[in-house]
Amino acid sequence: MDRRTFLKCSVLASGVAVSAPLGFAEPSATSLRLTLNPRKPGYPIPADFTGLSYESSQLADPQFFSPSNTELAGFIRRLGPSGVLRIGGNTSEYCYWTPDHTPTQDADSRNRDAATVLEQAIGPDTGKGPATQRKITPLAVRNLRGFIDATGWKLIYGLNMGTGTAEAAADEADYVMKIMGEKLIAFQLCNEPDLFYRNGIRKSDYDFAQFAAEWLHFYEVIRKRVPNAPFAGPDTAFNNEWLVPFAKRFSSQAAFLSQHYYAEGPPTDPSMTIERLLRPNPKLVQEFEGMTQTRQDSKLPFRLTETNSCYQAGKQGVSDTFASALWGADLMYQLASVGGIGINFHGGGYGWYTPIAGTALNGFVARPIFYGMLLFAEAGPGYLVESSVDNPQDAPLLTAYGLSSGSGSVKAVVFNKDADRAVRITVDPGAKITKASALRLSAPRLNDTTDVTLGTNPVGASGAWSGAYEALPIKDGVVVVDLPRASAALIAFG
């Protein structure tokens, strides 16, 4: 299967603009034709493809990831009945397993302590300030299991190889494995080890050979204590020079390969803009090439275990805007189209790019990128099918994907990331259809931070949402969809 069949990207022409009313064909709209071929399936989209990522230091508050945090659990369930929560990030290298030795407190003291901690949700680590050491206790792990059960999701759990010991990691892994059981899909031994030389965790000459020796030592110590412990790696920031040899050396030890990807950064750079975010990124193409090679060489699946728009916790005016919804959802399909098995968007607290912002005491809200993930969830799992757009050069910022649920239903997802021009697209589903409808992702402006809707409706408290599908007329077996500037649509056929 040709990756270019599924992934069509080019250069963004201009900037922020107001979208046209839904369903309105602008005089300057570009007319294109999208053809699906359900008889030519591509890669599958697993039910647990969607994921979120949080800092390990969030576990220092045992009440945050607990079944009592029902509002956060509701937002996560809205993204799908299956998914993967990843606990890791920069702070995983400064979190230490601490068995319970705390004297018994009375109920009032426990409640006061919980309220104090719950006011301070942990956001994405910027990597700039001094590292804060935090303790993870058995109570945090037990509550995390209750939270995982409340969402229906599974777990990737980060251990501290950066500043910890293999023996301590084995103690922690043993307890986590006992509590999580089948809910745990992998341990990760570190976070972005290819950057250890930059942040002072290792010396400047730290290389893959040294990392591989450390990784193997931790793996063997933990496996001796927990024989059935699953692992993934290398969880590098962006380094195919480490990913490929890791896949070759540890293909029998790893359940899947993991790596990170950030589209932009640092946020202080004025060239990191919405326009740049929506343009094709050569770095992503390179990362996908490394992924493809590792799949071929090792037969191991691949997951982006940490990703988002701009590293160092995001950029205000970019990461928290509607543009991130278009970018994030499109990235999910780009990854699926090259065989990736899943993605974890990093976040937490009030980080600019976090999909779910807030605290248990102040409440949570869906940020724009959440809406993009919700569009992906509404399309559902299944597999990609061959799709092609005629004259794609006429709309270089249009991407389109054909999907099948496996039960015979066909869908298309179309993104118009052009801020200046609408698209009128004729969709041929490649199968006989009796009805068609569209679920639209939209906002008044690309830089909107609050007025985002999916199916004309916003996401409410605890993830409450009910989207309205727009009926589409069928003529000669095809449908015509007017896609306003800077918008997306899920088109379902029946």
Image (cartoon, rainbow, N blue to C red):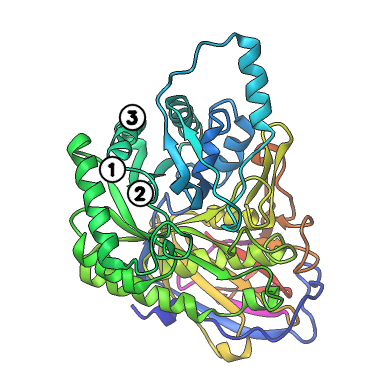
Task: Say if 56 sits above or below 418 in the image.
Answer: above
Label 2, secondary structure: give it.
loop
In the image, which residues are magenta?
422-438
**Mark 1 surroundings: few (<14), some (14-19) or many (≥20) residues within 10 A:** many
Where does label 1 land, which residue? 166
Where does label 3 land, which residue? 175
Which residue is at 42% across, 64% downward?
197
Task: Say if 494 sits above or below 58 in the image.
Answer: below
Residue 161 is marked as: 2
Left or right: 303 as drawn, with respect to 398:
left
Left or right: 146 as drawn, with respect to 458:
left
Residue at the far front in the pictured view: 203
Label 3, secondary structure: give it.
helix
Could you tell me residue 116's position as x and y percent? 68, 27
**Mark 3 surroundings: few (<14), some (14-19) or many (≥20) residues within 10 A:** some
Specify whether residue 428 is in view: no
Q: Are marks 2 and 3 in contact (CB under 8 Å)?
A: no
Which amino acid does the dot numbered 2 rest on? Met
Task: Say if 363 sits above or below 250 in the image.
Answer: above
436 part of magenta stretch: yes
Could you tell me residue 192's position as x and y percent? 42, 60
Which amino acid does the dot numbered 1 rest on? Ala
Could you tell me residue 87's position as x and y percent? 46, 45
